[in-house]
Image: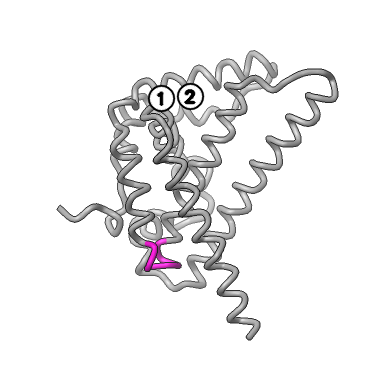
Amino acid sequence: MTLWLKRKSQDSRVYMCLKELRWDLEQSSGLRRAKVAAMAALLPTTMLTKLGHLDSTFDRPLDFPRDTLMDLYKILEDLRNTGKLQLKRTQRNMSQFGLELPEFAADHAIVSNRALEVWMATIGAGILPNRRDDAREVWSLLHGSRAFLDDAIASIQATEKQTEEMSGQPSAGFSTVYTNSEWKELCEFVPSQLRRPS
């Protein structure tokens, strides 16, 4: 019974991520979807490189055992949850001094968390194969925003610069790892098991 409850809890978490991310992207402008796509494209080769074997897992999640996928999902979920907590903590700390976190900084944090959820949703397609169409639609929405990528990349780069100026500290600098054309090329990726049938 304990194993059944554990699986049910895991399924619920994955389902809610897929549902909320898909809804958010469907309601978003093309520019905001492109920002999520651009940030998501960077993560496997920057922030997530230490996890190993991501290329094949993210490309073909349905080929991997559930336990392997849940281990990876939990890591991504913890990163996402930490990001949410950090944003709330920063907003709360600033409000104690009568300050407000600039909208561009809050939006960037939210977009970064959504980018993590793109990969959570991708892994989720292997955990809940019956929700594969939700994950497929997420990727379809992201891929459909390619016309806005130049503006999205410029906006992310401007946000990093503004953040550096505001904090006096260098940013994570993820947006400087690649040239803009290389970054756009990364955004062409769609997991092979989540592509729309042609």
Q: Position of residue 67 (x, y in %)?
A: 51, 72
Q: Which mark is residue 156?
A: 2
Which span is picked out in magenta?
Answer: 125-131
Residue labelled with disc 1: 152
Q: How far apart are marks 2 and 1 (CA)?
A: 6 Å
User: Residue at left 30%, top 45%?
Assistant: 140
- Residue furthest to the right in view is 96
The secondary element bearing badge 1 is classed as: helix
**Residue at the left extreme of this rendering:** 198
Q: Position of residue 135 (x, y in %)?
A: 38, 54
Which residue is painted at 39% across and 63% down in the image? 131
Residue 62 painted magenta: no
Report the magenta stretch's main SS: helix
The residue furthest bottom is 1
Amino acid type at circle 2 is Ile
Where 51 falls versus 180 (above or below)?
A: below
> Relative to residue 113, is residue 21 drawn left or right?
left
Left or right of 135 on screen, residue 165:
right
**Residues at circles 2 and 1 in contact by the CB criterion of under 8 Å:** yes
How many numbered tags mark residues here?
2
